[in-house]
Structure formats: structure tokens, C-alpha cells
Image (cartoon, helix red, strand yellow):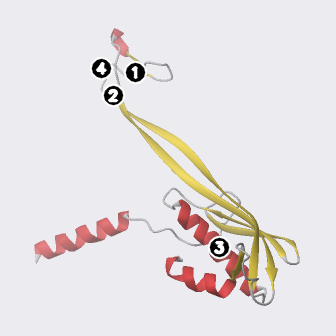
């Protein structure tokens, strides 16, 4: 019985550590999620900011999904992507593992430890990437024109991407 409880606890702990990208509105301009701005009656600027666990493909799919939602919410049938851009924001974080007698002073090229010791710290450099996708779109009635690559049927986009959408 105790083994089952421990095993169940381990499974729950592992599941809690895995992150699934969440599709959500951004609460402010710098937050993760989607936002849009209506520029003209049938023209929008749509943005999706991913967090550091959201892949580029997920950010772009979330953006397309949001464009399909806007199209259907406004009672249109398809949308055209006028311009779409995805940017990668990369940050680097360093952790220093150092055991120096007497403390240390950081901010120099080589940290110096107290009492005349020069330490050779070991550390890790972590790279964090966040993706932001921005698109301008126009809304249209009827069927998307045949052969126009950047015209998307909103219902089809919504149906194709629905399985990838996880909401809070």
C-alpha cells in the first residue's frame, strides 16, 4: 500500500513539472497570451506572446487560432493574413557554483575571494527563449479565393487547431 501511495505521488509530481502551453488572453501588454487591436472595421492587428515553455510552432498556431476566433466572432467566414512576423526573444541566465573561503566579490571578470584566494567558479549558462508572433489580418465573407495562400477559412482553422488549445 505504501509503495502505491509513493508511486502515485511520484507520478503527480512529474505531471506537475511538465508544462503545457496555455491559450489565454494577455492581461496586459507584456503578459503571455493573445491580444488584438481593431484598426479599421475589417482590419485587425493580432499578437500572441508565448512564455518560455511555448514553442515557436505553438505561438504561431495560437495566433492563427485567435485570428479564426475573431473572424467568427465578427460573423465573417475567412480572413487574409496581410503580414505575419515571429520574433524570438533570447535571454541568458548564469548560475555560479562557487565554494570560496571568506566570501567573494562578484562583478569582476574573475571573482576574487576573501583572504587572497582567487577562485575559479564553475557555473551553468541557461538560455531562455520566448516567441512573439504578430499579424495583420482582414475579414471577409464567402469562400476564400482558390489559390490564395494567405486566405484561411476560419471554421477550418478552428477545427484543425482545436485539439492543441488548452485553456485555464
Q: Upstream in the sequence, badge 3 or badge 1? A: 3
Q: Is residue 2 visible?
A: yes
Q: Which of marks 2 and 3 is nearer the N terminus?
A: 3
x then y, percent, for residue 127: 47, 44
**Mark 4 Cα-neighbour bin, 10 Å: few <14, some 14–19, many ≥20:** few
Circles 4 and 2, Cβ within 8 Å, touching? The answer is no
Q: Which residue is drawn at 33% across and 69% down?
A: 15
- Residue 100 sits in which quadrant? top left
Q: Position of residue 5 (x, y in %)?
A: 18, 74
Q: Point out the frontmost of discs 4 and 3.
A: 3
Query: Which numbered dot is residue 98?
Result: 2
In this view of the protein, which residue sits in the foreground, 106 or 121?
Answer: 121
Residue identified by numbered label 3 = 64
- Name the side, left or right, on which 24 lies relative to 123: right
Q: Nearer the viewer, mark 3 or mark 1?
A: 3
Residue 127 lies, with reference to residue 46, above or below; the image says above
Kind of element beneath mark 1 = strand
Of discs 1 and 2, which sits in the foreground?
Answer: 2
Tag 1 residue: 104
Crowding at dot 1, Cα within 10 Å, few <14 / some 14-19 / many 20+, comes out as some
Q: Tell me if residue 137 comes above or below residue 30 in the rendering.
A: below
Asked if marks 1 and 2 touch (Cβ < 8 Å), the reply is yes
Label 2: which secondary element: loop
Mark whose residue sits in front, 2 or 3: 3
Residue 101, image x, y percentages: 30, 20
Label pair 2/3, CB-CB below 8 angstroms: no
Q: Is mark 4 on a helix, strand or loop?
A: loop
Amino acid at each position: 500500500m505504501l509503495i502505491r501511495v509513493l508511486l502515485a505521488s511520484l507520478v503527480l509530481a512529474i505531471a506537475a513539472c511538465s508544462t503545457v502551453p496555455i491559450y489565454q488572453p494577455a492581461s496586459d501588454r507584456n503578459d503571455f497570451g493573445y491580444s488584438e487591436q481593431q484598426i479599421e472595421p475589417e482590419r485587425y492587428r493580432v499578437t500572441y506572446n508565448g512564455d518560455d515553455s511555448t514553442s515557436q510552432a505553438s505561438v504561431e498556431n495560437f495566433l492563427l487560432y485567435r485570428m479564426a476566433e475573431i473572424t467568427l466572432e465578427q460573423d465573417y467566414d475567412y480572413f487574409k493574413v496581410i503580414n505575419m512576423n515571429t520574433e524570438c526573444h533570447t535571454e541568458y541566465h548564469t548560475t555560479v557554483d562557487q565554494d570560496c573561503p571568506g566570501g567573494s566579490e562578484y562583478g569582476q571578470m574573475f571573482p576574487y575571494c576573501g583572504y587572497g584566494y582567487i577562485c575559479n567558479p564553475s557555473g551553468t549558462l541557461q538560455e531562455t527563449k520566448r516567441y512573439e508572433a504578430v499579424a495583420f489580418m482582414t475579414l471577409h465573407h464567402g469562400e476564400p479565393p482558390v489559390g490564395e495562400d494567405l486566405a484561411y477559412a476560419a471554421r477550418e482553422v478552428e477545427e484543425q487547431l482545436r485539439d492543441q488549445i488548452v485553456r485555464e
